Image (cartoon, rainbow, N blue to C red):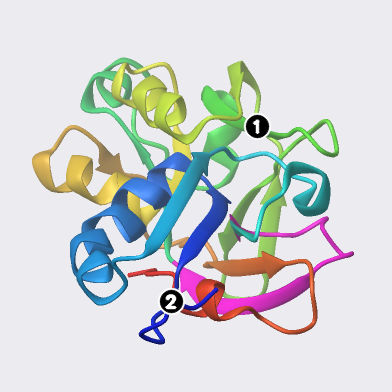
């Protein structure tokens, strides 16, 4: 684990959603490798539940509710969410003004493969958090394809700000129901042992 000079060495095997790897980890790797030249990171991108021990992973990064209760969970903070759609979609179907209006619209839904269930849409009202199940013609479990479907005008999206923001700033996507914001989702680091390894501790997560 350490070189003769005392620096960390070896391989760090990590799994996380591709969008998070692209936006939160990869930009920080040049400075990481300057500080830790003897570490090799094997980074796989997925949004599915993984068996850390069977798959030989040191840790996984996940967003939202967790089913991996057998592992140690470290809260890495919250990630903001946004509901949005393309201008082309809104020109065709109109801008929803209320939560009830959403039932007359098309959604691009996200499926939790572990539970084999569509993930509910969540909105904050003055009184409480509301969960809705919306009709859709497309159900996905890949974050990049999910955003692409929204950009293509297939339906309304509800996703992470971190990969929707560039499209919102360019006008390719438009925020929907800003007065009913989406509760933020927890970002969690999962690892199999009680003692967090030094290599996992230094993983660059921006």
Q: Return the residue nearer the eye: 138 or 43.
A: 43
In the image, the segment drawn in magenta is 62-79
Q: Which mark is on residue 134?
A: 1
- Quadrant in which residue 3 is drawn: bottom left
User: What count of labels does the image hold?
Assistant: 2
Residue 77, magenta (yes or no): yes
The image quadrant where one finds the C terminus is bottom left
The image quadrant where one finds the N terminus is bottom right
User: In x, y percent, where is residue 36?
Assistant: 32, 72
| Residue in view at x 39 percent, y 68 percent | 205
Q: Return the residue nearer the eye: 40 or 47.
A: 40
- Looking at the image, residue 124 sits to the left or right of residue 53; the answer is left
Residue that numbered label 2 is attached to: 3
Q: What element carries label 1?
A: loop
User: In x, y percent, where is residue 170?
Assistant: 10, 40
Is residue 83 visible from the viewing direction of this image?
no
User: What is the CA distance from the residue labelled 1 to the residue labelled 2?
Assistant: 54 Å
């Amino acid at each position: 684990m350490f070189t003769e000079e005392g620096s960390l060495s070896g391989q760090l095997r990590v799994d996380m959603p591709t969008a998070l790897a692209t936006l939160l980890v990869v930009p920080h790797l040049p400075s990481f490798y300057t500080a830790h030249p003897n570490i090799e990171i094997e980074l796989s991108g997925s949004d599915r539940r993984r068996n850390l021990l069977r798959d030989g992973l040191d840790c996984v990064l996940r967003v939202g509710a967790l089913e991996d209760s057998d592992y140690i969970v470290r809260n890495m903070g919250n990630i903001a969410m946004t509901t949005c759609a393309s201008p082309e979609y809104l020109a065709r179907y109109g801008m929803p003004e209320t939560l009830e209006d959403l039932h007359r619209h098309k959604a691009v839904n996200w499926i939790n493969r572990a539970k084999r269930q569509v993930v509910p849409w969540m909105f904050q009202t003055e009184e409480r958090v509301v969960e809705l199940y919306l009709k859709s013609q497309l159900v996905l479990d890949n974050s990049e394809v999910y955003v692409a479907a929204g950009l293509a005008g297939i339906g309304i999206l509800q996703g992470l700000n971190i990969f929707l923001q560039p499209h919102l700033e360019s006008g390719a996507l438009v925020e929907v129901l800003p007065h009913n914001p989406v509760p933020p989702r927890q970002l969690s680091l999962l690892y199999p042992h009680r003692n967090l390894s030094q290599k996992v501790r230094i993983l660059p997560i921006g």
